[in-house]
Image: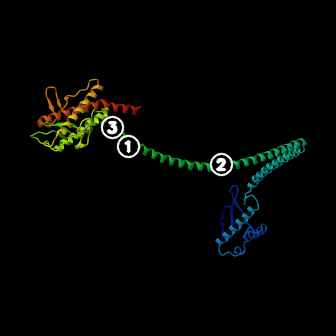
Amino acid sequence: MATSEKARDKEGMLVTVVCQRCSTPIRLHNTLQSSELVKAATNLTKKTNKQVKELSPAPYSTPKNELESISNDVAVVTDCFRSLSEQSDIDHPLCSSCPESTMDYYKEEIRLAEEAVDNYRRFLEDLVTSSSNTEDIDKLEQELVDLQREEESLTIELSGVQDGLVKIEDQLKKEKERGTRLDKEEREFWESFNEHQLQQLDLRDQSFGVELQLQYTRDQLGRLKRKSVLNTAFYISHNGHFATINGLRFGKLPSIPVEWSEINAAWGQATLLLYTLANVCGVSFKRYKLRPYGSQSFVQDDEGKKKYLPLHTSSRIFADSKYDLGMVAFLDCLNQFKAHISRISEGKFTLPYYIEKERIGDGDEYYSIKVQFNTEERWTKALKFTLTNIRWAMTWVSANVLDSERRDSSSNTIQ
């Protein structure tokens, strides 16, 4: 609430206030003195249950100065109008024209309230009328019974659903446990799978290594098959005028003396080679048997007076007829072996040098294999021809007997 104040003269005062509805200035009557205002304010305060603080008249009866008196008058007027405003819904003060518009406002409010009352009354009458209809009541009661039955049915269904929910929760718990167990089994499976994978890789590496080793072995076997076993075991060659077997010279010359121990060892290798060829081809010599004992080899004569014919001696001086007979018997065994091979090969096999008893040659000239009554040159020549014939026999056996057996063995292995 706005107020304004004016001082008219020194003898009297006039307090001016504003209408709280239209804000029009309102002038109070000048006959209202401060003491009267104080009394009115005091009485109004008592009527409003002391909602306005009690005002003391002392300051207004004996003001100290003019300004203090005016301020007190304004305060008194303001408190009076505040008390009036709190007693109603209308703010005070009001001008002379505003109460009429206020009355119109309240008349409209009263009219609207009366219309609302009429509407409530009609609704109440309709409600009472509808309640008095027994058919509607029976219908509503039947609907209530149906709803109660439906409620019971739904309650039973809800109970069943709750039971099913409990079962589902139990099943869900079991499935979770089963899922946990399956996860564990899956981890164990993958761990086992990875371990087997590593084992498989190791086995693959081992298998690859075995295959490489097998391939190497096959290559070695093929290389060995292509080689002549006999030629490897008994390597026959020549060294100048001498025939050699495994590096041992066969014979001696006046200009090139050869130790008899070397010659004896050469005879031992030649005897072992002819003995091996005879066994491979299944040849049994008539009358003679070869005894390959290295440097002490000899030929056994089953029909002669001298049973053991040596193929070794310590010197030419001490060489006797047994040594010559032994070399002749060796030539006879070689000639029998040639006859056997020629027979099974249908005459396709022959030796480069002919053998006639103790002699060997190319048809134009023959050389005796005996030491007695013979020169070292011719004797060495006869030994060279003898070793050459043995080499031819060894080559034929390697190509026609041993290779055939290897081919048969390979085919059986493949089958």
Comparing labels 1 and 3, the label whose residue is closer to the camera: 3
Secondary structure type for disc 2: helix
Quarter-of-image position of residue 296: top left
Query: In the picture, which quadrant includes the C terminus?
Result: top left
Identified at 35% across, 31% down, the residue is 407
Identified at 36% across, 41% down, the residue is 213
Judged left or right of residue 156, residue 174 is left
**Residue that label 2 marks:** 172
The percent coordinates of residue 95 (x first, y second) are 72, 57
**Residue that label 3 marks:** 221
Crowding at dot 2, Cα within 10 Å, few <14 / some 14-19 / many 20+, comes out as: few
Mark closer to the chain start, 1 or 2: 2
Mark 1 and mark 2: Cα distance apart in space: 54 Å
Comparing labels 1 and 2, the label whose residue is closer to the camera: 1
The type of residue carrying mark 2 is Leu
The type of residue carrying mark 1 is Gly
Crowding at dot 3, Cα within 10 Å, few <14 / some 14-19 / many 20+, comes out as: few
Mark closer to the chain start, 1 or 3: 1
The percent coordinates of residue 331 (x first, y second) are 21, 33
**Residue that label 1 marks:** 209
Secondary structure type for disc 1: helix
Mark 2 and mark 3: Cα distance apart in space: 69 Å
Mark closer to the chain start, 2 or 3: 2
Q: Closer to the camera, 26 or 230?
A: 230
Mark 1 and mark 3: Cα distance apart in space: 18 Å
Q: Closer to the camera, 20 or 133?
A: 133
